[in-house]
Structure formats: C-alpha cells, structure tokens
Image (cartoon, rainbow, N blue to C red):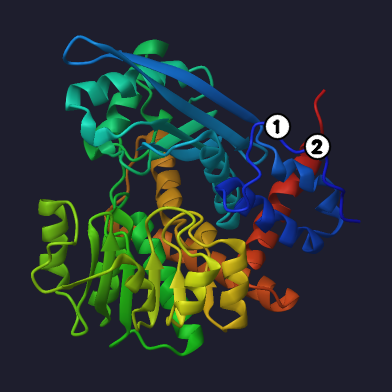
Amino acid sequence: MIPETTTPLSFVSDSPESPWATYLSQVDRVVPYLGKYARWAETLKRPKRALIVDVPIEMDDGSVRHFEGYRVQHNLSRGPGKGGVRYHPDVTLEEVMALSAWMTVKTAAVGLPFGGAKGGIRLEPKELSLKELERVTRRYTSEIGIIIGPQRDIPAPDVNTNGQIMAWMMDTYSMNTGSTSTGVVTGKPIHLGGSLGRIKATGRGVFVTGREAARRLGLKLEGARIAVQGMGNVGGTAAELFVQAGGKLVAMQDHTGTVVNNEGFDIKSTLELVKREGGVAGHPKGQRVDNEAFWDVDCDILIPAALEGQITPARARRINAKLVLEGANGPTLPEADDVFRDRDILVVPDVICNAGGVTVSYFEWVQDFSSFFWTEDEINVRLDKIMVDALNNIWETADRHKVTLRTGTFAVACERILIAREERGLYP
C-alpha cells in the first residue's frame, strides 16, 4: 500500500521548480515499485537533520560580515553522511536539502556504505580574498563541527570549493578535536591524505556511464557530436574523455556565454583557455551565440554539468541529442523527464551518472583509515567496475519495471535505503 503524504515541511517553498520539489516528485514516482518497503517512504521525504549557522568573519578592511551556512544530513541509515560543500550566492536551505537527498540516493545506487549529506555557504567567492575565504571556511567548519566527523559526516568539494578549502576544513576540525583527522573530509590535496584520481573522478564517471549507455543504444563514440553545459571540473573532464574516444566537442556553455564549432573544438587548447580566462566565451575558434541557442544545437550527446533546474519542459522539446548525461545534480525538471521519455531520448540520471566523485571519495576515506594508498590505475579500474556494475543492475531494474533509468535508479537505491531503515528499526 502506498502511504499517504503527511504534513509537508513548513520551511520549504511550494514552487514546483524548486530542487526539493523536483526530488519529492522523483520519490513519488518510485513509491509504486518499493513493494513492502513503501510504508517507509515518508522517511525519504524528510531530512534527518538540518543545521543553519551564522558565519561571521573580519574582512581584510577591518569590517565584519556575516554569511549564512548550512549542513544537512538527509539519511544516515546506511552509514555516515557524505556530500560536498558549495560556495555560491544562490545557496539556500532547500537547495542543500535536495542535494543531500540526492546524495543519499547516489551512494545507495552504487552500493557505498554512506548516507547523504550536503553543505553550503551563501556567498560569492570571487568577491573574497584568499585570506577571507580561509576565515569563512574555518569559522564554518567550527560551526558545523558538532555534527561532522570521519564516522559521522564527511564533507567534500562541490561548486566553487576545492582541495585547498578541504585542507582548511580538515585542519580546523583537527585543531578543534586535538588530533590530526585526515578522514573528516575527502577531496584533499594528495600530500594531506587525498586520493589519486579524485579530481577527475566525477567527469570520468560521466564518461564511463555514457560509454556504456551509448553502447546499448548502438551509438558510436567515434564522430559523436558532444555538447557540454559547464566546462568546469566535471564537464571539462567528461568532454576530454569523450574527445579522446573519438567524439567531437561542438558546443559549450558556461556562465560567460555559449560558443559552437561544427568542426569540433580542440580539447587541449580549450581546457587551457578555460583555466586561463575563466570561461569559454572568448574561444578564438568558437562562434558566439545566444545562450538559449545552446539547447538547439545538433548533437548526439548532451552533458548538462552546471547547476540544477536547467532543462525545463520547453528546452527538452528542443534538444536534439540521442543521449543526455547528467553531470550536474538535478539539472532536469520532472516534467522535462516526461518529454524526454515521450521523445525516446535516453537520460542517464545524475544519481548514477555523476557518482564517480563520491565513489573515489569513498576510496579516499578507506585509504585514510588504512594509511595505505592506491595507484591511480588501481583507482580507475575499481571506479570503472563499480560504475558499470551499478549501471547494469539499474538498467535491468528499469527494463523489468518498464520505467526510465531515473526511476530504475531510485528503485534500486531507495529499496536499499529502506531495507536498512527497517532492519535498524526505530529508536527509542
């Protein structure tokens, strides 16, 4: 029996396009496939813990500014929380809740012993000096220190955060607890206990799942036309690997603009340009077009690797791709999913497609505990196997239920989460 929805959370908006509303719609769609575990489905709709913190710092000019920070632990039934920390002016509690929930599903989908968590601070990092960013990071870490830890909740990099931010977080937590604790975060610099292969892991996972999906579709990567939204760590790495496999990068979009080149961009010079200039808009080999024209580009594979909510139903009706690989979290609205299904466009959903990052974060966590580190080749082999095995299992589930890969992924993951919930029982 499908449970009735109880009182909704009082502090979330009723906008159908909010990230949290997108996540709830995805859960509703999977409930009919959860069998006897459907009675626990309400568990999936409520974060276990949400912490809002004030982050006051002294700026370089002597003034004091306050920033709002969050850490949400969505579900810890399968293990400690795992999820990134983003620095962005549009960060909200609802967004962080949705991202933490998708992490719960993601870790379960690939079989990792983690729950889902996420964090963020509402700020524009480009407006802060390096020292100001360090002060913000250290104060934020101290504020959320009451709920994080190597066996409780392990942060990682996300939008606008990196290995340096993780190093400051690790050091702050270690100073506050009185001993070096490398396992409190992942995505750290290598010499502080970071893992080889971590930086490119998310983009590599997008490529691996895309390669397998293309094979099932009969889509050859040689000559395949690739369009990427977001040429950062995830989109840039995925583009690089697809080009190495014979694909052509024909369109790119980021916060600076949109450029197209029907003959294909040279990937090496493109990545160098993005690193040097901070965006794709000034590419000398690209034709600058309106941002909305990106969704009309003739391509075989589309990789949205920016922020959530990018693919609306209207845009989904215009997209010409055969395969959509969600490098970003929550880029496709539920109604757009329906459009893709009706148009026979395959979507490999975020909760499996971009799970390469959290998988190698798990490897890093394990290596930190054992103080024994693997080679990058070992990591890539293990990552590829986990991603391919997980995708095959999801595909079989989707075929059995005659549902999309997204619903199939949620079916596999949510069943694992709710089995753990039932077996652990309710305390007290």
Amino acid at dot 2: Thr
Left or right placement of residue 234 versus residue 343 in this view: left
Dot 2 and dot 1 residues touching (CB under 8 Å): yes
Amino acid at dot 1: Ser
Foreground of the two, 353 or 376: 353
The quadrant in which the N terminus is found is: bottom right
Mark 1 burial class by Cα count in 10 Å: few <14, some 14-19, many 20+: few
Q: Is residue 200 visible?
A: no
Foreground of the two, 275 or 192: 275
* Quarter of the figure with residue 51: top right
What residue lies at 47% left-to-right and 71% top-to-bottom? 315
| x and y, in percent, of residue 284 in the image | 8, 69
> Total label count?
2
* Position above or below: 347 against 7: below
Query: Helix, strand or loop at disc 1?
Result: loop
| x and y, in percent, of residue 138 in the image | 33, 19
Query: Helix, strand or loop at disc 2?
Result: loop
* Position above or below: 66 against 9: above
What residue lies at 53% left-to-right and 78% top-to-bottom? 346
Q: Residue furthest right?
A: 1
Left or right placement of residue 90 versus residue 109 in this view: left
Give the CA distance from mark 2 to mark 1.
8 Å
Q: Is residue 124 visible?
A: yes
Which of the labelled discs sits on residue 7, or is there none? 2
* Quarter of the figure with residue 160: top left
Which of the labelled discs sits on residue 10, or is there none? 1
* Quarter of the figure with residue 200: bottom left
| x and y, in percent, of residue 45 in the image | 71, 43
Left or right placement of residue 279 versus residue 156 in this view: left
Foreground of the two, 150 or 276: 276
What residue lies at 62% left-to-right and 81% top-to-bottom? 342
